[in-house]
Image (cartoon, rainbow, N blue to C red):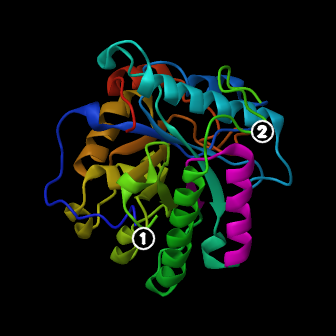
């Protein structure tokens, strides 16, 4: 499977260039057009972004989400296959992930797979973000079964992709068990939205684990689980809200020290009428993009 990889023994703790953004889920593209447009801006070091219509794919294809998905995919194609020299084309290269709500292990397997298939059929997602993922050892077999099946579906789905897709224009953006190499470059990761350190067995159940999701007041005093040191930074993501601009460097140092390769920091705090601190851009978006530097997700 793509996520059954050998573990490393050293942690990369120098340089911000290793970082890239994981976007937990912006607001609907109709309500947050600037946010979705920024994901396709050349130079944005995007690893992946989550599409979440209604805690899942919704009841039917949404034209605004179809357009956003197409634009993100086309930005990746330009980044990977542009005519300019590679170093000057490090445009947004992130993958689109469909949001599957595991409800901490309470949702039936069949419902989750039906949502996954809708995401693939309608939006041609590259991978999946498993939100509200359980973290206890007792739920591990069910999570492994789900990620194994999703990996197989993604691999088979990629084999059937040739050219356009209903609802998209390939030019303007409208409208696995065999390992990473066998899934093709367009296939993205399976990410477990845990929000905390789970039982160590979860590290072998997905490509990436979100091991912190919460406020800056907790993050600045957080500690990393010892077992994570055996894995490279690309296996972990941290989402932190309420990070003041003056503490960006400190937040990056913490993420680097704790071995996270994917981050999303924002000064939004979920208060003053904000229902979701990650639904919009932080006020210092341009600054944090420039600090991380351009990149591309291979």
Numbered circle sitting on residue 298: none
The residue carrying mark 2 is 166
For the residues labelled 1 and 2, the Cα–Cα distance comes to 32 Å
Magenta: main secondary structure equals helix
Number of the label disc, if any, that sits on residue 205: 1
Please name the residue shown 54% across and 25% down the image.
75
Quarter placement of the C terminus: top left
Q: Residue 264 appears at what percent x and percent y?
A: 46, 40
Q: Determine whether, in the image, residue 219 is placed left or right of residue 173.
A: left
Q: Nearer the viewer, residue 57 or 287?
A: 57
Relative to 57, say whether 139 is above or below: below
Q: Nearer the viewer, residue 199 or 240?
A: 199
Q: Residue at x 79, y 30 (%)?
A: 30
| Residue at the limit of the structure toward the left, as seen here | 10
Tell me which numbered mark, 1 or 2, is placed earlier along the sequence. 2
Q: In terms of depth relative to the viewer, which is nearer, 38 or 272? A: 38
Residue 221 visible? The answer is: no
Relative to 200, residue 151 above or below: above
Verify whether residue 113 appears in magenta.
yes
Residue 57 image offset from top left, x and y in percent: 75, 53
Nearer the viewer's eye, disc 1 or disc 2? 2
Mark 1–mark 2 contact, CB under 8 Å?
no
Residue 150's x, y, as percent? 56, 65
Tell me the quarter of the picture where residue 80 sits: top left
Query: Residue 234, position in %: x, y?
Result: 32, 50
Classify mark 1: helix, strand or loop.
loop
At horizontal 78% and vertical 35% (from top left) the residue drawn is: 167
Q: Which residues are magenta?
A: 109-130
Q: Using residue 138 as the reference point, say whether residue 59 is left or right of it.
A: right
Residue 191 lies left or right of residue 203; in this view the side is right
Residue 132's place in the image compared with 264, above or below, is below
The N terminus sits in image quarter: bottom left
């Amino acid at each position: 499977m793509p996520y059954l990889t050998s573990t490393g023994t050293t942690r990369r703790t120098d340089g911000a260039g290793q970082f890239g953004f994981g976007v937990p889920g912006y607001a609907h593209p109709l309500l947050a057009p600037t946010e979705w447009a920024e994901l396709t801006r050349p130079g944005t070091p995007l690893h992946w972004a989550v599409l979440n219509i209604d805690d899942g794919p919704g009841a039917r294809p949404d034209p605004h989400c179809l357009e956003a998905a197409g634009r993100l995919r086309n930005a990746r194609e330009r980044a990977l296959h542009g005519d300019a020299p590679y170093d000057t084309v490090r445009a947004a290269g992130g993958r689109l992930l469909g949001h599957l709500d595991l409800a901490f292990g309470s949702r039936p397997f069949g419902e989750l797979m039906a949502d996954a298939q809708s995401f693939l059929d309608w939006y041609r997602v590259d991978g999946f973000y498993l939100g509200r993922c359980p973290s206890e050892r007792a739920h591990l077999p069910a999570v492994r079964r789900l990620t194994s099946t999703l990996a197989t579906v993604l691999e088979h789905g990629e084999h059937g992709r040739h050219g356009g897709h209903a609802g998209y224009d390939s030019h303007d953006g409208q409208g696995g068990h065999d390992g990473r190499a066998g899934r093709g470059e367009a296939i993205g990761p399976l990410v477990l939205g845990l929000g905390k350190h789970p039982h160590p067995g979860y590290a072998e159940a997905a490509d990436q684990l979100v091991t912190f999701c919460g406020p800056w007041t907790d993050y600045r005093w957080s500690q990393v689980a010892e077992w994570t040191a055996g894995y490279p930074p690309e296996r972990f993501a941290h989402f932190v809200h309420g990070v003041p601009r003056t503490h960006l460097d400190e937040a990056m140092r913490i993420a680097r020290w704790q071995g996270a390769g994917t981050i999303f920091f924002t000064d939004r705090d979920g208060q003053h009428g904000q229902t979701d601190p990650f639904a919009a851009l932080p006020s210092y978006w341009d600054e944090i993009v420039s600090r991380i530097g351009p990149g591309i997700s291979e």
